[in-house]
Amino acid sequence: MSDTNGGGSLKETLWDPIAGFGVTFRTMFRKPVTEQYPFEKRPTAPRFHGRHQLNRWPDGLEKCVGCELCAWACPADAIYVEGASNGTSDGTDGGGERFSPGERYGRVYQINYLRCILCGLCIEACPTRALTMTNEYELADDNRADLIYEKSDLLAPLLPGMVEPPHAMLISDDHHDYYAGKTLPVVEVTHGEATE
């Protein structure tokens, strides 16, 4: 004897549709969660991948040495870096202008946020931790040209005690001391004169 209703059992005809709508039935009577963005902004996770930032050493020199490893690691080809030689104190190679403690610095640094997928591979490739990602996620704009961030847009702000480059190395005369984690010498001020 053949089955006239298509071969379906009682489980298939009654239970499977109920199980399929299980998620719908479970959430039907819950209060909806609506975020009131942009009026109420929820904090992001501490390791959220947001806008990039070029960091500085404690004396204000840039950490970027213009190695271009971040540009090579970027799968979207969103980073453009041009390295240049730092000046020396004897007046050759740039007239004494020093922007980073190494031999080179990033003269031109651009990130095209029209291409960037915020994957974080560039910060993994950076040997000096010059490039990190902040928690800033509001990157939308109505002008395409404004989404190409230049070096001046990406550099970390100067904190108290930092000096705007170019200037001489203030932590040490040896650039290896920067990478070893040495800090600025402590200067005590007593009655208007500085002593170390």
Image (cartoon, helix red, strand yellow):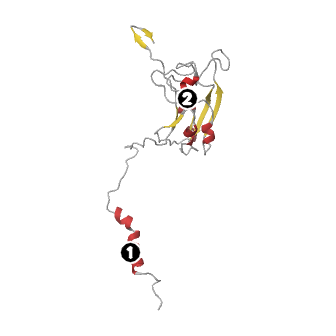
Q: Which residue is mark 1?
A: 15
In the picture, measured across the screen, residue 39 lies left or right of residue 95, that is left
In the picture, measured across the screen, residue 127 lies left or right of residue 40, that is right
Q: Position of residue 4 (x, y in %)?
A: 46, 87
Please state which amino acid type lies under the numbered disc 2: Lys
In the picture, measured across the screen, residue 9 lies left or right of residue 97, that is left
Q: Position of residue 108 (x, y in %)?
A: 62, 31
Q: Which residue is mark 2?
A: 63
Can I make out residue 147 in this image?
A: no
Q: Is residue 189 above or below residue 37?
A: above
Residue at point 60%, 29% (across, down): 65
Q: Is residue 185 above or below residue 1?
A: above
Q: Quadrant of residue 187?
A: top left
Residue at point 58%, 39% (across, down): 125
* Disc number for residue 117: none
Question: Are the residues tagged 1 and 2 within 8 Å (C-beta)?
Answer: no
Q: Nearer the viewer, residue 114 or 155?
A: 155
Can I make out residue 60 in this image?
A: yes
Please state which amino acid type lies under the numbered disc 1: Trp
Mark 1 or mark 2, earlier in chain: 1
Q: Quadrant of residue 84?
A: top right
Residue at point 57%, 34% (across, down): 127
In the rendered picture of this protein, how many numbered marks are placed on residues? 2
Q: Position of residue 179 (x, y in %)?
A: 55, 27
